[in-house]
Image (tube, helix red, strand yellow):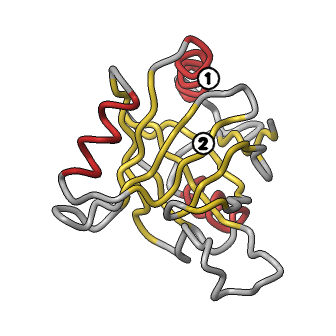
Amino acid sequence: MAYAVADIDDGVQRWLADGVGPFFVNPHIELARVRVRGAPGRFDHTSAFAWWGDVMVELIHQHPSSDGPDDADQIVGSYGLHHIAHFVDDFGTAGRWLTESGRAEVLYAETAGGMPFAMHNGSVSRSHLIEIYERTRTLVGFYDMVRSASIGWDGRDPVRVL
């Protein structure tokens, strides 16, 4: 699950104070082929990842563009539950089903490595976005690395920049 934060460093510190960590911070995540609400766009964001019990937690902050806070490409609000991520068996089929069921695509992008992901409006039945992507060896390896670092974590090296 992902939480939008107004400031990534402050957000990480608040979660660390609750004993969650360590956090792996990925600043200004490189993306390709970004589409926002159906049109070419941008999504400059920083994410911090940690494991909280049995759940991967992402803190996400979107960096403002030169257009300011009313930028039409704004995906991330200032705070609160932002999205729940789901592995899907078939990215295209899942995206079509979400769209056809009234959950419009808000964001489509590909990672620098070419993995597509999308966020759909979940307001039909939820107050957050729904993120989808297919399970890949690289992604599962990353999740496993973050989880392993949390097991028996002693509070040292709480913030690790990727």
Which residue is tagged 2?
A: 49
* In front of the other: 111 or 150: 111
Q: At 74% across and 59% down in the image, what residue appears?
A: 44
Q: Earlier in the sequence, mark 1 or mark 2?
A: 2
- Alpha carbon of mark 1 to alpha carbon of mark 2: how far? 10 Å
Please, what secondary structure does the residue beneath circle 1 have?
Answer: helix
**Residue at which label 1 appears:** 142
The residue nearer to you, when weighing 41 against 12, is: 41
CB atoms of marks 1 and 2 within 8 Å:
yes
State the residue at coordinates (55%, 56%).
Answer: 15
Residue 124 x/y as whole percent? 19, 65
Disc 1 residue type (three-letter):
Phe
Tell whether 162 sits left or right of 141: right
76 up-or-down from 150: above or below: below
Secondary element at image label 2: strand
Q: 68 or 33, which is in the foreground?
A: 33
* Up-down relation of residue 20 to residue 38 (above or below): above
Horizontal side, residue 159 vs residue 121: left or right:
right
Of 157 and 136, which appears nearest the observer?
136
Kindly indicate the quadrant of the structure image that contains residue 132. Answer: top left
